Image (cartoon, grey):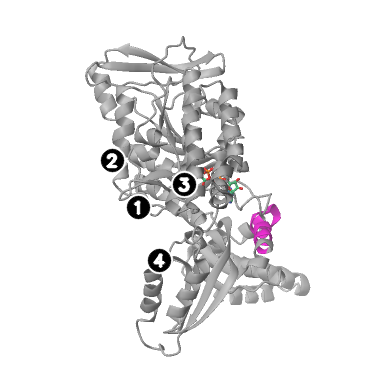
């Protein structure tokens, strides 16, 4: 592994030439200037190799001044989009071939590819590490998960017909690492990150080699080698600002000197102090993709999943969940932060900062339009967008009787959380009490959760009475909080019908999220009931008829200063006049009475 980490493995060694058959109305154009030789790759199109369609590259020596300048402005010839494929999208040789087809179905693009580990490799590596701690040095080779990982990757290499030597060193190192863990009898967070990094290092090497084999020039990169600089928070590292220029320099520089599709490991970084491999938290490849998108200022970031986009709810909880066509960065961030596994919680930040649209697509169903995530969208018709569930949350009720009318209570409480490095999700306060929930994702990898909680309670008890409530769930309603009364009216109706009591509500400044805290045991049933109330056809219609758009119209008719009010008044009077006159004339046959009543009504 050391060798692999020391330098980037360049798999695309020679530019390939194919006779091309143009199928796209906009031919894929690559143009680049080589500082010394002015080599310009000037056109790319699709051809067919023995394995199917291929992206082909033709080199012309000598770019025109105009082309070089256009390239330097980034207007022509640079990388255009990021395409990130998650574990489910690259789970087997078959899936990898399908992914190549996906990539080639965008012939006008020049993508940066970001890959996660194959299938469930990350989980298997973690399990292998845990088993190694106690199985003894001589038994590490028999760990089932290690066998599984080796077989999966060797089989994939064989089925794709690429050279096995691109992964054999890594597999040997993985075995050695597990022996080391067995010898030390411990798995530190740092070692854990190093261990799981093998997943992405293996998948990207195999995929880049396959692209090269079928004639699509590609180059593999380990993120920790190309400038992904992070904090040293192993298993949950944050990307540092220095990453953006470093990654841009490396990827852009290599592309202009020798164009080849970059295939980058997702999820991984390099700690800025330790220089060790770090990981960005589970699902971190999404963040790798958006970071590259921002670094290179690309046009779009595509995140390819195994679902038709971001759905109205987790399909495991409610299989009838529907794709959401359009989200804002804020909505997507709240959704991810409050537990929708589909996106990494931090992944929207670089996209928002760079104002780069993120498209969530299904690699199993390319035709599905997916979800587009942008800075803003038309919210005039938006009510509820998605329902998210975060389970196993800890809630704290903190009550101070002494602090009535005094200041500093909140500050004291939050300074305790800051000192203990614990992050808070939802907060609701009154003059003398605070209810809050603690973020389980920040605690997931720690072994001392219970001790930490005891410590928090101990500290807080010095200033308040504390009630620790475990096994709670946060149901987050992502939508248009401007319509909170409408949403809450419906929510409470549904919860009342299901006999569920809400223990805390939080509607923050985000304008897109209302969170309700309920018992874990009731949470899934609530989400299902809420989903069918908000999203199923009949109910949705009912909801739309109560849409404030209509309410606003109705209120305008009732506003005495509005024209509509005047028209309605005149209309009602004319109507009453006609009815009265007709009745009177018919009953009395007296035309004098008619004139008298008409006069009274006109004065009225
Ligand atoms: N609101 C949601 N919309 C879409 N998928 C969701 C949602 N909530 C949870 N999921 C789950 O997220 C999964 C996709 O995310 P993930 O497994 O990280 O994909 P990948 O590994 O392909 O990047 C889906 O298979 C689905 O089960
Ligand atoms: N392989 C890592 C990183 C990742 O992003 O994976 P995926 O894209 O499959 O969620 C994980 O399992 O957490």
**How far, Cα to Cα, is label 4 from label 2?**
30 Å
Residue at position x 55%, y 58% from top? 383
**Location of the C terminus (image quadrant):** bottom right
Graded by Cα atoms within 10 Å as few (under 14), some (14 to 19) or many (20 or more), the crowding at tag 3 reads many
As drawn, 462 above or below 418 = below
Q: Which residue is mark 3?
A: 284
**Along the line of sight, which residue is nearer the eye, 434 or 506?**
434
The answer to the question of whether label 4 and label 3 lie on touching residues, with beta carbons closer than 8 A, is no
Q: Nearer the viewer, mark 2 or mark 1?
A: 1
Q: Which residue is mark 4?
A: 421
The local secondary structure at tag 4 comes to: loop
- Residue 282: percent from the left, percent from the top? 50, 50
The dot on residue 245 is: 2
**How far, Cα to Cα, is label 3 from label 2?**
20 Å
Q: Nearer the viewer, mark 4 or mark 2?
A: 4
Residue lying farthest to the top in this orientation: 19
**Along the line of sight, which residue is nearer the eye, 349 or 447?**
447
**How far, Cα to Cα, is label 2 from label 1?**
17 Å
**Location of the N terminus (image quadrant):** top left
Q: Which residue is mark 1?
A: 231
Magenta stretch: give its range: 526-540
**Along the line of sight, which residue is nearer the eye, 439 or 295?**
439
The answer to the question of whether label 1 and label 3 lie on touching residues, with beta carbons closer than 8 A, is no
- Residue 113: percent from the left, percent from the top? 45, 33
Q: Earlier in the sequence, mark 4 or mark 2?
A: 2
**Along the line of sight, which residue is nearer the eye, 595 or 236?**
236
Q: Earlier in the sequence, mark 3 or mark 2?
A: 2
Mark 3 CB near ligand 2 (8 Å cut)? yes
The answer to the question of whether label 2 and label 1 lie on touching residues, with beta carbons closer than 8 A, is no
Is 460 included in the stretch rendered in magenta? no
Q: Earlier in the sequence, mark 4 or mark 1?
A: 1
């Amino acid at each position: 592994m050391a060798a692999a980490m020391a330098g980037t493995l360049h798999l695309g060694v020679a530019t390939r030439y194919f006779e091309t058959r143009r199928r796209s109305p906009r031919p894929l154009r690559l143009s680049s200037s080589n500082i010394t030789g002015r080599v310009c790759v000037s056109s790319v199109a699709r051809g067919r190799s023995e394995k199917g369609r291929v992206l082909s590259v033709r080199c012309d020596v000598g770019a025109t001044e105009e082309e070089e300048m256009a390239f330097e402005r980034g207007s022509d010839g640079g990388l255009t989009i990021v395409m990130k494929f998650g574990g489910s999208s690259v789970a087997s040789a078959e899936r990898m071939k399908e992914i190549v087809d996906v990539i080639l179905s965008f012939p006008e693009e020049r993508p940066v590819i970001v890959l996660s580990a194959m299938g469930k490799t990350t989980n298997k590596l973690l399990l292998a590490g845990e088993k190694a701690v106690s199985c003894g040095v001589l038994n590490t080779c028999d760990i089932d998960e290690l066998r599984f990982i080796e077989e999966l990757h060797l089989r994939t290499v064989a089925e794709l017909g690429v050279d096995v030597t691109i992964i054999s060193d890594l597999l040997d190192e993985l075995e050695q690492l597990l022996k080391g863990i067995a010898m030390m009898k411990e798995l530190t967070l740092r070692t854990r990150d190093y261990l799981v990094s093998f997943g992405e290092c293996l998948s990207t090497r195999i995929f880049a080699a396959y692209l090269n084999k079928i004639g699509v020039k590609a180059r593999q990169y380990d993120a920790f080698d190309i400038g992904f600089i992070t904090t040293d928070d192993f298993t949950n590292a944050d990307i540092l600002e220095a990453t953006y220029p470093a990654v841009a320099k490396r990827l852009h520089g290599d592309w202009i000197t020798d164009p080849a599709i970059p295939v980058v490991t997702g999820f991984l970084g390099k700690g800025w102090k330790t220089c060790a491999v770090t990981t960005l938290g589970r699902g971190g490849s999404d963040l790798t993709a958006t970071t590259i998108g921002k670094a290179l200022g690309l046009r779009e970031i595509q995140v390819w999943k195994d679902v038709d986009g971001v759905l109205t709810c987790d399909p495991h909880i409610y299989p009838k969940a529907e794709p959401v066509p359009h989200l804002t960065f804020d909505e997507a961030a709240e959704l991810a932060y409050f537990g929708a596994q589909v996106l990494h919680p931090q992944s929207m930040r670089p996209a928002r900062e760079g104002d780069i649209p993120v498209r969530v697509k299904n690699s199993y169903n390319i035709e599905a339009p997916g979800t587009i995530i942008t800075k803003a969208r038309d919210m005039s018709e938006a009510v509820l967008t998605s329902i998210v569930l975060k389970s196993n949350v800890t809630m704290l009720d903190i009550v101070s009787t002494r602090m009535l009318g005094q200041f500093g209570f909140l500050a004291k409480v939050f300074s305790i959380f800051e000192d203990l490095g614990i992050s808070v999700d939802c907060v609701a306060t009154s003059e003398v009490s605070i209810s809050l929930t603690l973020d389980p994702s920040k605690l997931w990898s720690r072994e001392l959760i219970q001790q930490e909680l005891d410590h928090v309670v101990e500290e807080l008890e010095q200033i308040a009475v504390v009630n620790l409530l475990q096994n709670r769930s946060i149901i987050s309603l992502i939508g248009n909080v401007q319509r909170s009364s409408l949403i809450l009216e419906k929510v409470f109706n549904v919860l009342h019908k299901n006999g569920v009591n809400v223990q805390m509500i939080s509607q923050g400044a985000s304008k897109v999220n209302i969170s309700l805290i309920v018992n874990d045991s009731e949470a899934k049933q609530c989400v299902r009931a809420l989903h069918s109330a908000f999203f199923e056809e009949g109910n949705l219609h009912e909801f739309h008829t109560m849409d404030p758009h209509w309410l606003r119209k109705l209120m305008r008719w009732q506003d005495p200063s509005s024209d509509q009010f005047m028209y309605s008044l005149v209309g009602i009077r004319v109507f009453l006049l006609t009815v009265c006159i007709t009745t009177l004339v018919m009953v009395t046959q007296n035309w004098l009475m008619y004139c008298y009543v008409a006069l009274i009504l006109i004065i009225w």
